[in-house]
Amino acid sequence: MQGIRDREQETMKDIIVQKYGGTSVGDVDKIKKVARRVASYSRKGYKVVVVVSALGGTTDELIKLADQINKNPSEREMDMLLSTGEQVSVSLLAMALHKLGVDAISFTGAQVGIRTDSSHTKARIVDIGTSRIKEKLKKGSVVIVAGFQGVSGDQEITTLGRGGSDMTAVALAKVLKARECEIYTDVKGVYTADPRLVKNARKLESISYEEMLELASLGAQVMQARSIEVAGKYNVPIHVRASFCKEKGTMISKEVRSMEDVLVRGVTANKKEAKVTVCDVPDKPGEASKLFERLAEARINVDMIIQNISRTRKTDISFTVPTSDLAKTQEVVRKVNKEIGAKGAKYDRDIAKISVVGIGMRSHSGVAAKMFKALAARKINIEMISTSEIKISCVIHRTDADKAIKALHDSFGLGKKTLSRKKRAVRS
Amino acid sequence: MQGIRDREQETMKDIIVQKYGGTSVGDVDKIKKVARRVASYSRKGYKVVVVVSALGGTTDELIKLADQINKNPSEREMDMLLSTGEQVSVSLLAMALHKLGVDAISFTGAQVGIRTDSSHTKARIVDIGTSRIKEKLKKGSVVIVAGFQGVSGDQEITTLGRGGSDMTAVALAKVLKARECEIYTDVKGVYTADPRLVKNARKLESISYEEMLELASLGAQVMQARSIEVAGKYNVPIHVRASFCKEKGTMISKEVRSMEDVLVRGVTANKKEAKVTVCDVPDKPGEASKLFERLAEARINVDMIIQNISRTRKTDISFTVPTSDLAKTQEVVRKVNKEIGAKGAKYDRDIAKISVVGIGMRSHSGVAAKMFKALAARKINIEMISTSEIKISCVIHRTDADKAIKALHDSFGLGKKTLSRKKRAVRS
């Protein structure tokens, strides 16, 4: 028995999972390009499992169709509808690989046994059957799996929520013990700051799951946050890289000692939140909790919460919510204020949350001071502050956001190193 | 046990299966219309099982996409691709029914257990699980099933070939013992002749499976021929009718005695065939068979075959093939001619096959004579003749086809009865 198991380990050790997002398979030509990249790995001897999203734009089109029919569609039927998008792209990619002479086979989530719970539109993977994939890989086939979808215990088609294809890829990499899970996207990797904004932003060679998680949830939209969490939990090595470029991207992996040498890994801005201040809340136990209970019931995702010690019997509470939830928030706040006797509320859409993230700051003090000093030097006013072990976030006026990001990127020395005179000479 | 079974029979006796083709669900408004019709049946207390095709045009778009990627796509992957079309339409119809307050649930072929063999793109249904459908029907749900698709023993998605949704509907009606299988289409029923051509063509109230089968395969494109065959085999009552009209259509059912009173049920023309004549074939046993063997190997569907007694040692053989197969046919004929030493071949694209069909002609002679006489009176030359028990077909020049159909329709008295003077007065 032991011998058989060992041999299986042997055969399977060079499995690579590659995930291509919707923009990577946006049209026929791009599908052909992706096929060429997959083929090159297959020819090198890797056993390739490919996870594909729906063709760019397809999901939105289907949502629009549903919306024309029923503004409040059943989540079960939405999953039926949307899961077709990935089924189209996997079959087309298989055909493109066949055209290149590569053996390939496509599977839906159900066919490959991606079992989920039955929470339609936001299902969680509970188990993945690997026998069918392994059998095909052994025969030398590229296995193409529809991302974003699974099947519940009672044979219902489920989907995993926005960014769910990342989760499919990470989960497959985990159960297949893949050597790497490559996430192909339209950027070359994870940067110290948004490269469209900060000219000398540097692509990171590596980053820890924790740091990436903070950056993902803070608005660096490279990968779905939940997938990074799961990858971290099971220690699945992630490689974020560009679909149409051979350059290496950024490795996301477990924290290694050398990571601590870097105080701050990156800076990021979130311009999609609004600030709410509820004024003169009676400073009695339970009053604030009522507010946040009601917000939670309304499924509003509250991010930062600030309450200062009050000098009177009343206090002001500030918090941030996604701008898209602001209308709903105002409604909830109006009701709660009557209930608890608060005076009123102020709303500010023109904020930005800027954050610095780095595992190094765990063991080094002074990061916050440096951040505040850098902002003060540019006369940028800080409205709210919130910190975690590896992150410091400040809410500032939205018009100051770009200036602040550049300032912090400079202050923490995150930019590309200036080339030495000699190297420059060689280059030119 | 007996008691339980009886009760089940009782509950299920009012099942109606309705099939809506692609033109019936061509856009959002049409889907809403179909939903209203389904809802009206459900509210009357019927247990409704709906089979839906892909939204009009979708299948062609998907085929075009595949063609841009691989001119010769794998049939398995084509099934993966094309089956998404029906999955989209069933989920949208479910949403439309929910909007009307009707309980409904959609299923893929796989979910409902439409088991097929593994002949991709032309699979045959081997079994259908009914427990899931019955359970939902009992709860008062409308059950919507994706047409055209099934699942093979090894969980592969299969499709049933062109017109396959008809087969899904008929097969479901059979296993559910439905009282009726309604086939909704863009015509009001089966006519004595093409109503676009023959002004006084009459909609038939009823027709036998056999007659309909002849008419279907002869070009009256109301329903897939294989589905009619199966409906006949299991005696499933079919009702062909228009999607957006309340009028009753045509019932297809077992032959009843009264049907014999009608000599000819309808006349039909097929303008999609071409005639091939292979000249001077050596009149030795086996030479002709070689020709048709090679044609079969090339998957060319030969329809009529005519060979006259030869007065010399050579003979001419004529046959018809679909015009779309003519190029392939020419290739085969060239090769075979060399092999058997035939002289050459003539090809004629400008033919039409006109046919009269009726169970009545079984027991009445003289139909052929009447047909030939009617054609002769219009100076229409007959090039080939072929007969079956309930059908007579003649190949004529294509430009004569419309004239011939009108002539035969008149001769056999198939048109609408002229209204009496009194009725006319009431009407005007």
Image (cartoon, coloured by chain):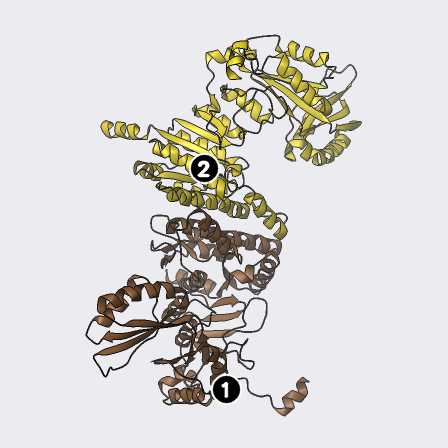
Chain colours: A yellow, B brown
SS at badge 1: helix
Location of residue A377 by image quarter:
top right
Q: Residues within 10 Å of mark 2 (few under 14, many from 20)?
A: many
Location of residue A330 by image quarter:
top right
Image x and y of residue A63, in percent: 59, 46
Q: Is residue B150 above or below residue B318?
A: above
Three-letter amino acid code at the position of disc 2 = Val
Q: Residue at x 67, y 32 (%)?
A: A294
Q: Is residue A86 above or below residue B265?
A: above
**Is A183 placed left or right of A285 in the picture?**
left
SS at badge 2: helix
Image x and y of residue B219, in percent: 44, 72
Residue B390 visible in the displayed image: no
Of residues B337 and B242, the one drawn nearer to the viewer in this rendering: B337
Residue B351 visible in the displayed image: yes
For this orientation, the residue located farthest to the left is B285
C-alpha span from label 2 to label 1: 63 Å
Residue A34's tag is 2
Three-letter amino acid code at the position of disc 1 = Asp
Residue B392's tag is none
Between tags 2 and 1, which lies in front? 2
**Is A79 placed left or right of B213 in the picture?**
right
Q: Quadrant of the N terminus of chain A?
A: top left
Of residues B364 and B81, the one drawn nearer to the viewer in this rendering: B81
Of residues A275 and A354, the one drawn nearer to the viewer in this rendering: A354
Chain of the residue displaying label 1: B
Location of residue A353 by image quarter:
top right
Of residues B399 and B15, the one drawn nearer to the viewer in this rendering: B399
**Residue position for label 1:** B410
